[in-house]
Image (cartoon, rainbow, N blue to C red):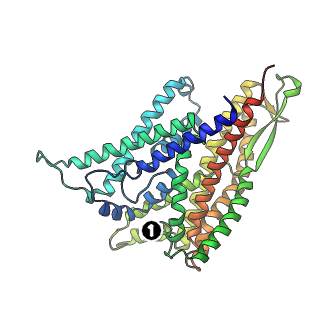
């Protein structure tokens, strides 16, 4: 197939699948009052945060409200499992791995669907035809949410095979659509004071956003190249390198930091505010509007940066594979010394990279303590950086597709 035709075909597939996603997000769950459900979800900040980065939407519950959240949760858990380097996992065939991943996705869909139902429990219309104390609308909603999440995962798989950008490319429209809301009001009252987006505000946001994109794109492209010796490879190919990104965690900390940070606030009385010493402590240390909360949020970003960065680099597994393949770093013994060598470079890169990520997240919040509306740029920067990483994946795939047909045996 002509490579240009292949690219056009893949882009067409992705556009078609994105259209299905947009339509699916408009199909409301039956048996609920949309206005009541929307008001209920407006009070749950962590769901709003996570929906912005996983392709869901919480304006009103719909078929695809959960988005790619169950799938992305599953992938994180699976990365942790594979990082453990268990023999039983390594012996699994690709088919069995796929089946296990699907069951894990279904498991998280059931949990997260139930979570959504709990938060909109006051919005369900009564439907108990047999008078047994069970509202059928609740069961129907749960089935629809779980089915929608599995359908979204299937669409992602289709895009990975036929489209462009891989499985999670389908979350891009949701992130883009959430930027104006995040810029004008953050996510509810937990981050910022709402203000109208005037022409002046939009121009300032566009200019700052463009500057941020340029700087972060080049930072994201930054890599440390560790020279690798391959003695069993013909000499012309024996020299290579192991790449380690400067921002080892990518944008993953921003996909989950805000939502995780907002979870403890569920312990605070949602109607009248803090009612005892513990709730006041939670309200202070898990607030985007206090120095204590901003410090805690920065620490969370750094910790997530180390966790996701380690999952991406996996020094232990890399060192083991290099030893098995007869590869080594110059003046570094194979095995444990190689693992320590990689871990040392990872630690130093991650320290600086994660501090930059923390600055991106908390910098606007600090300014927002003195300038109304400035805190909203924390949401803007997070969304833009996620888009940068997703766009880079698409660019790399396009380059690969454009060059794959340039090689021939004869």
For the N terminus, the image quarter is top right
Q: Quick check: 392 above or below 233?
A: below
At x 34% / y 65%, what residue is drawn?
Answer: 39
- Picture layout, residue 81 above or below residue 230: below
Q: Position of residue 132 (x, y in %)?
A: 12, 46
Residue 134 falls left or right of residue 101 = left
Is residue 251 something that shows in the picture?
yes
Residue 361, by quadrant, is: bottom right
Residue closest to the far top = 410
- Left/right of residue 140 with respect to residue 194 in the rendered view: left
Question: Between 320 and 390, which is closer to the camera in this rendering?
Answer: 390
Name the spot of residue 313 as percent of width and height, x first: 67, 41
Q: Residue furthest left?
A: 131
Q: Which residue is the site of mark 1?
A: 188
On screen, residue 84 versus residue 139, left or right, reads: right
Locate residue 184, reporting x and y percent: 52, 71
Q: Is residue 249 visible?
A: no
Q: Secondary structure at mark 1?
A: helix
For the residue pair 75 and 162, the one nearer the viewer reads as: 162
Most foreground residue, 125 or 296 = 125
Question: Where is the C terminus found, in terms of image quarters?
Answer: top right
Q: Residue at x 47, y 71 (%)?
A: 284
């Amino acid at each position: 197939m002509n490579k240009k035709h292949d690219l056009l075909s893949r882009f067409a597939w992705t556009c078609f699948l994105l259209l299905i996603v947009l339509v699916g997000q408009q199909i409301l769950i039956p048996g609920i009052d949309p206005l009541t459900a929307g008001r209920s979800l407006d009070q749950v900040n962590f769901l709003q945060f996570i929906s912005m980065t996983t392709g869901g939407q919480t304006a009103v519950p719909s078929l695809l409200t959960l988005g790619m959240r169950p799938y992305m949760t599953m992938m994180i858990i699976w990365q942790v499992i594979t990082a453990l380097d268990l023999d039983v996992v390594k012996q699994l065939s690709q088919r069995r791995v796929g089946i296990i991943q699907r069951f894990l996705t279904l498991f998280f869909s059931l949990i997260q669907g139930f979570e959504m139902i709990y938060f909109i429990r006051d919005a369900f219309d009564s439907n108990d035809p047999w008078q047994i104390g069970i509202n059928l609308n609740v069961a129907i909603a749960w089935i629809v949410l779980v089915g929608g999440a599995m359908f979204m995962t299937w669409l992602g798989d289709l895009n990975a095979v036929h489209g462009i950008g891989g499985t999670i490319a389908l979350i891009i429209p949701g992130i883009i659509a959430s930027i104006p809301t995040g810029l004008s009001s953050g996510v509810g009252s937990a981050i910022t004071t709402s203000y109208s987006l005037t022409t002046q505000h939009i121009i300032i946001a566009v200019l700052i956003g463009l500057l941020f994109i340029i700087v972060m794109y080049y930072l994201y492209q930054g890599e440390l190249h560790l020279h690798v010796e391959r003695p069993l490879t013909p000499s012309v190919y024996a020299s290579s390198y192991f790449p380690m990104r400067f921002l080892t965690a990518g944008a993953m900390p921003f996909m989950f930091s805000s939502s995780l940070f907002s979870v403890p606030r569920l312990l605070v009385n949602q109607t009248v505010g803090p009612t005892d010493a513990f709730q006041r402590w939670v309200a202070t240390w898990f607030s985007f509007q206090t120095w204590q909360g901003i410090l805690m949020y920065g620490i969370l970003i750094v910790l997530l940066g180390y966790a996701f960065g380690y999952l991406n680099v996996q020094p232990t597994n890399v060192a083991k594979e290099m030893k098995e393949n007869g590869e080594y770093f110059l003046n570094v013994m194979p095995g444990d010394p190689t693992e320590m060598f990689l871990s040392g470079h990872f630690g130093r890169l991650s320290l600086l990279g994660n501090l930059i990520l923390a600055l991106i997240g908390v910098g606007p919040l600090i300014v927002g303590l003195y300038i109304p509306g400035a805190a909203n740029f924390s949401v803007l920067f997070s969304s833009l950086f996620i888009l940068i990483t997703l766009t880079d994946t698409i660019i790399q795939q396009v380059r690969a597709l454009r060059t794959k047909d340039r090689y021939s045996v004869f």
